[in-house]
Image (cartoon, grey):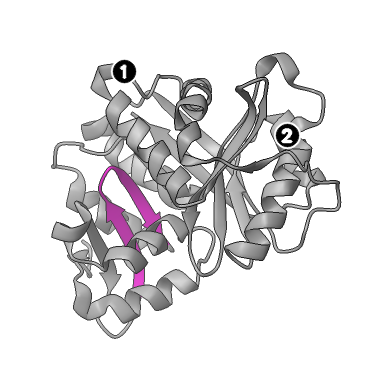
Amino acid sequence: MLTVAARLLGDAERGSVERLLDRDPFGGAQVAERVSMAGLAWWRQDARIFGYGSRRNLESLCWIGANLIPVHASAAAVAAFAEMVANEPRGCSSIVGSADAVLGLWSHLTPTWGPSRDVRPNQPLMAVSAPSPVSADPNVRLVRPDEIDLLFPAAVAMYTEVVGVSPTADGGERSYRERIGELVRARRAYARFHNGRVVFKAELAVVTRHTAQIQGVWTDPELRGRGLATAGIAAIVRDALRRVAPSVSLYVNDYNTPARRVYERCGFQQVGTFATVLF
């Protein structure tokens, strides 16, 4: 029997939530950004955030919206969160976060939520807080709002390659284009252009006071192996550290050896391990 149940959190506990998120500045970045922007009220977030532990000692969090994201979740918290959502229809497109928590949740939820489309159990979470030791590409720059149409095909290609399905499927093109546009207007989207097309690109998909998280890294398949990604990531790290946050982070599939080599050459070191369950 569980002695402590998971409970819905509200703005009255925002201070406790933020202190817990500060204890996991890289693993909790996705939740921390959303809390900083809109607090904890579900109607502002179109999501719910649950806590485990007493009001005086909040131990773990679980964000439930388009994604399910556990943060600093102990085995007992994982069991409580799983019990809470197991009988609900699955509304999220993925479970992502610390590997132990994600895989623990999935072991509890598989009987009612399964099957998944893919499980990626070992994704090194990496970070850097100093400029990269390799030369930065001077041609990698922020994408301008009038270049969204040029960036969009590369963004679709990246998503399809990494996730395994197109973001434009099932009527998703409009919302995905809006997301890309938001990143561009927020000065978070970077690209190198050549002859009017994108040959390298990446975004700062998550920004907190602790870190800027890179996602969506993509190099034109015809130009891979020529160092574009290494120099491009170095350029993004340099700009992000100067302009956005005191560290830069990302997570990568363990089997993506070329990408891991790029990040290691750019000075990234592993600070944790993520896992992702895709539906």
Question: Residue 259, located in which quarter of the rendered image?
Answer: top right
Name the magenta segment's main secondary structure: strand
Residue 153 x %, y %: 48, 21
Please state if 147 lies on the left or on the right of 260 as rendered.
left
Residue 200 x %, y %: 65, 30
SS of the residue at dot 1? helix
| Residue 159: in magenta span | no
At 40% from the left and 19% from the top, the residue drawn is 166
Between the residue at mark 1 and the residue at mark 2, the CA separation in whole angstroms equals 28 Å
Residue 274 x %, y %: 53, 47
Residue 230 x %, y %: 77, 38
SS of the residue at dot 2? helix
Quarter of the figure that contains the C terminus: top left
Residue 115 visible within the image: no
Q: Residue furthest bottom?
A: 56
In this view, 202 is above or below 225:
below
Residue corresponding to mark 1: 169
Tell me the kind of residue under disc 2: Ala
At 70% from the left and 43% from the top, the residue drawn is 233
Tell me the kind of residue under disc 1: Ala
The one of 190 and 207 positioned closer to us in this rendering: 190
At 34% from the left and 73% from the top, the residue drawn is 17
Few, some or many residues within 10 Å of mark 1 (<14, 14–19, 20+): few
Quarter of the figure that contains the N terminus: bottom left
In this view, 33 is above or below 146:
below
Between discs 1 and 2, the one toward the N terminus = 1
Please give the range of residues in magenta: 58-71
Please state if 105 lies on the left or on the right of 233 as rendered.
left
The one of 35 and 235 positioned closer to us in this rendering: 235
**Circle 1/circle 2 CB separation < 8 Å:** no
Residue corresponding to mark 2: 229
At 79% from the left and 53% from the top, the residue drawn is 132
